[in-house]
Image (tube, coloured by chain):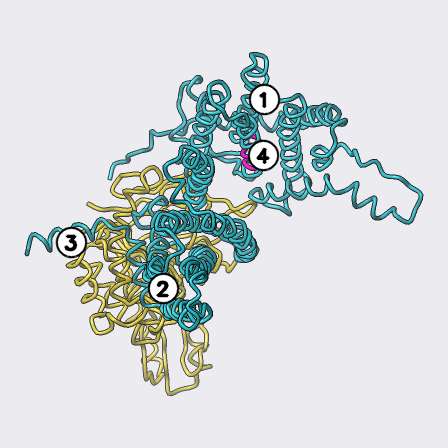
Chain colours: A cyan, B yellow
Amino acid sequence: MKRFSMFITRVCDRINPIVVKETRQAVQSRVLIGLLMIFLIINMIIVAITIGSSNILTNHDLGRAFKLGRNMFVALYTALCFLSMIFIPLYAGNKMSKERSGENIDLLYITTIGPWKIIRGKLISSIVFLVLLYSISMPFMTFTYLLRGIDLPSMFVVSLISFFMVIVATQLTLFMATVSSSKAFSSIMRMGTLILLFIFFSGFFPMYIQMLYKGIGSRLGTADFWSETLVVTLPFLFIFILLHIGSVASISPSASNRMLPIRIYLAVCWIIGTAFAILLSVYGSMSDAEEIWAVLSVLVGCIYMLFVVSETETFSMRIRKTIPRGLLGRFLVFPFYTGTVNGIAWCGVYIAATIGLNVILEAFNVFSLSDRELSLIACFLLYTGAYSLTSLLLQRTLLKNLVPRKLTGLITIILVVAGSTLPYTLTIMTLFTDISVDWTWPFNLIDLLDSKKNADKHLAFSAIWLFIMVTVNIPWFFKQIKQFKPGNNSTNIISA
Amino acid sequence: MMNVVIKNLNRRFGKTIALDNVSFEFDKGQIFGFVGPNGAGKTTTLRIMATLDEPDSGDIFLSGKSLTQYPENARERIGFVPDNLPEDTDISVHEFLDFFARAYNLKGQDRISRIEGVEEFTGLTGILDKKINALSKGMKQRVSLARALVHGPDVLLMDEPAAGLDPRARIELRELLKVLSSQGKAILISSHILTELTEICDGVVIIEQGKILETGTIHNVMNRHVPKQAFIIRSLDSNEELRKALMITPGISNVRIAGDEIYAEIEGDDSRGASLLADLINKGFRILEYRRHTQDLEDIFMQITEGKLQ
């Protein structure tokens, strides 16, 4: 007995402290307990209404009785999905956001608990609550199997997929909550999160229902089912891990090299993705592999650029002590360190590698992307680079005292929106005049997608614009590069 | 031996210089008061010491080991009581302390006994099941202190611990700090309530506009800034006549009437004070009260600082 209690104590000691605390808070929270009770009642009402409206007890309608199990499962599943996909991510995100904008988060940071453990703990405690929610629904869902009209594999697979989707959505809200500690910005992020969750829910829910109506059980043994599942799952796994690492980076001390895990992760994913795309193009039957790879690479590169320009331009003592002393070592690790110029260098390598590899693989007939697709990839990357460097220049010069560096990404978004919509705005403004506006405005990313004939013009313009921006920023780049040198470790220990 | 050395700390926030070459030190078993006007740089210094911020240059050494280079090690040795109180909802006092004990990686029986120890020391045993957000300010302050002590730190940093507390809670806090100091902890307290500090502090650090103006033991600081002895005299005779008599006495300065008393500063040692009393009696003044005026931290603080804000 003593051994058993010691074993239990050891197990309890290994549980993440955040999970212990959040679970304790959850079970003592009247709101959460009330919600679980309401959900239980909703489940009971659904069962009662579905059976009552089917008339099988009075009319003995076997046709309807055959569908009863499926109909009831769909109703129960809808309630579960809605609550779990909206409420759990929102609850986790709101809690994190409140803690982050409050001053008590400092208490957590001065303990020996690390940022990885904090984010992991937050996620696991949400999963615990998700399990509680599922455990309420499960007995009712199992009951639907007894009514017929639905098979166990379908129930299991659909429930499992939505379970994982809730975890991805929760990670998304945690990330949104960690991005900023400012109360005003947190409120905007909360609104954005809510909209994203509704999009998430309305996007996936019809898919699950379709899967249920088609039935999954018969397809489980086929290769097609698993390859499709893999194709859908892998991007979500990629996004989930990226959001997880991003959340950790957001709450890591600003004095640490917090961008390192993100850059390593993106680089590794890019290499693995490239290898997969090449393999599938050469040996596989998936003709779209290179397009998917190209679109994902461009998307990741463009989005990451917004974060890169918002990074700090000073290297803390803690970072400096890890910078290699040798020139070659310093050159190699430069793109992996936190810092605007370091980030720009990383993006530069990323853009060059993506465009360069595409051109090479085209030349060797490994990839068969069309010229338009290639110029689109190049244009998007070049435009994003040009827009980002322009916003960085604006922030450093005209807006230095108005906008902090961490909001430079926001300037980029504003510039992109303004640049792309200006011709349309002008068109609306000149509707009642005789002035005609040329929609092929060079800054226009929407035109880039629409117009086939102007692709070359866009390519030339974006390349020239980026070149000018790089040239204008060069003195500042060199100043930053000079700062990237190791700190002095000689004062490490002084006599006590 | 545990000592804390703050060496040439500099910290800027944009154009504002928050800390300008801040250096001071204190030892095991000492309580140091950290005083200065609002915006002087006290909280910035404490946050750097608690590893919540990093200096632009300079360092802090705990028994010779750099805090900026090894912040993870420092966290095990430092307990920090910030100026804001815990506001967590749906969690009891015991669960709150248990969470922080776990966060400091305390395990098994060690964790249980440490928590019980701080609960008893801070007098929380009667309210262990109460929810944190339902506690009074004084009780929250005790919980905050218990949280900072749960991992057994050698250094305790407190930011305005007495702010908002009633007199009883202040006295209790003072007693707890004295016990902690006798246990060998190095304590740094930032406070505006200077009279409180005078009673419990061994030393003081005075900071203004990010610069250290004065640092040392209370005794040394007093000696440096109170070179003359001051006396309070109360007489049955006219205060105006007594003032005139004092003003023409050699070695007496800064004579002023304060209510029904007279304040005067005397150059020289204790015997000079005694002979002044004899002189006054000989001159026929009927002296009711004659006592030494002891200057406190508040007087010195007012003398040294200029009340400049950043």
Relative depth, front residue between B272 and A459: A459
Query: Quick one: SS at disc 3?
Result: helix
Q: Does A190 appear above or below A224?
A: below
The disc numbered 1 marks a residue on which chain?
Answer: A
Chain of the residue under label 2: B
Res A302 label:
4
Q: Toward the viewer: A431 or A337?
A: A431
Q: Which residues are magenta?
A: A298-304
Q: Amino acid at mark 4?
A: Cys
Label drawn at residue A9: 3
Disc 2 versus disc 4: distance between alpha carbons?
Answer: 41 Å
Q: Which residue is mark 2?
A: B86
- In the rendered image, which quarter is residue A419 located in? top right
* Foreground label between 3 and 1: 1
Q: Percent x, y for residue A110? A: 34, 50
Q: Report helix, strand or loop for mark 2.
A: loop
Q: Relative to residue B125, is residue A306 depicted above or below? A: above
State the separation of the CA atoms marked 2 and 3. Answer: 28 Å
* Crowd around label 4: few <14 · some 14–19 · many ≥20 (10 Å): many
Q: Please determine whether, in this image, residue A435 is positioned above or below residue A7.
A: above
Q: Residues within 10 Å of mark 2 (few under 14, many from 20)?
A: many
Identify residue for label 1.
A355
Q: Amino acid at mark 3?
A: Thr
Secondary structure under badge 4? helix
What's the residue at 55%, 16% (across, down)? Answer: A361
Q: Secondary structure at mark 1?
A: helix
User: Are the residues at dot 1 and dot 4 in contact (C-beta closer than 8 Å)?
Assistant: no
Chain ID at mark 4? A
As measured in the structure, the alpha-carbon distance from the residue carrying label 1 to the one carrying label 2 is 53 Å
Mark 3 or 4, nearer chain start: 3
